[in-house]
Amino acid sequence: MGRGSYTASDWTRLRSSFGNEHRAEKIFSSACSQQSSLAGVYREARDNEDSPQSTPVIIGFDVTTSMGYLAEELALNSLNRAIMYLYEHKPILCPQVMCCAIGDCKSDKRPLQVTQFESDIRIIKQLTSLYLEGGGGGNGGESYNLAWYFAGKRTRTDCYEKRRKKGILITIGDDCCHGTLTRAEISRVFGDSVPYDLSDEELIAAAEEKYHVFHICIEKGATEDEHIFADWRSLMKGRVTVINKRDISCLAELIYALISIAEGSSPNEALKAVDQRAAETAAKSLAYISINNTDTISF
């Protein structure tokens, strides 16, 4: 895994294979090929001749009922553009990208699905192999914390193990996060036995050992948007930002800017690489981000 390099021509061929009917049910797998439990499942981002200084990037996105458009946007546009920015402007070396499909562990059969860390067009090929369960319990939150658990406990990276450098973990969604992962949920999803329920704060701290952790909150024009964003800001002060659903076409630029800022760029420096309209939209979002130009996140 993590071999090869990403090219525009490979992306053009893959996108053409989707045909003209760009709907999630046509692009993504109609059945989940992954096991329902992630017991014993690990993902590795390792150095190799193509990626001598690999940097892991995890993009976790909400696949509950309200978020089908986000999966489409990532598959058809944003993930490709974000990767091309990374290759062209090199805020990180040798990106290896893993995607997570996030649901609700209180109601869904497969609340977390994960791809491999990849460096070439398999990033998006594996993305489209994920199953959009379309669940979610209508219970005041989703399980974004599953991505933090997996990143902290189930990924192995040369970036951290050899160089003590952090990768990047970005989750994206439009709801609050459940406040804990219970012992029963951890056992069901991961097959792990833990002595007590784990709070979101504990899960974020574990993930932050190896990753800069961010969340992008999507406003959907609903009355609860303000409450949801305030809840995230309380949980992840300085590391959560917001983008309106109508500006979702600028998601790639926001992802790229967060990665660049984590690696020491100022917002202005990060946004020089993108077009003016996208930069203006992303700049408003980045006003909420506060991070030192080191490996330590500001609280």
Image (spheres, rainbow, N blue to C red):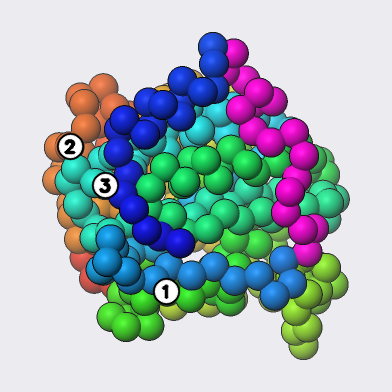
In the displayed structure, would residue 179 be above or below residue 206?
above
Q: Give the labeled residue for mark 2.
A: 273
Q: Give the numbered dot on residue 86.
A: 3
Residue 245, percent from left and from top: 51, 26
Label 2 vs 3, first from the N-terminus: 3
- Identify the magenta region: 21-37
Alpha carbon distance from label 1 to label 2: 28 Å
The reply to whether the C-beta atoms of the residues labelled 2 and 3 are less than 8 Å apart is: no
The local secondary structure at tag 2 comes to loop
Task: Give the residue displayed 37% in from the left and 58% down from the top.
Answer: 3
The foreground one among 143 and 284 is 143
In the displayed structure, would residue 88 be above or below residue 15?
below
Q: Give the numbered dot on residue 157.
A: 1
Label 1 vs 2, first from the N-terminus: 1
Q: Amino acid at mark 3?
A: Leu
Q: In the orientation shown, which residue stands out farthest toward the top?
A: 20
Taking 6 as reference, is 271 left or right?
A: left
Q: Is residue 71 magenta?
A: no
The foreground one among 95 and 238 is 95
When asked about the image quadrant of residue 189, the answer is bottom right
Alpha carbon distance from label 3 to label 1: 19 Å
Q: Main secondary structure of the magenta part?
A: loop
The local secondary structure at tag 1 comes to strand
Task: Give the residue displayed 20% in from the left and 61% down from the top.
Answer: 264
Tell me if mark 2 has few (under 14), some (14-19) or many (20+) residues whose alpha carbon lies within 10 angstroms of its own.
Answer: some
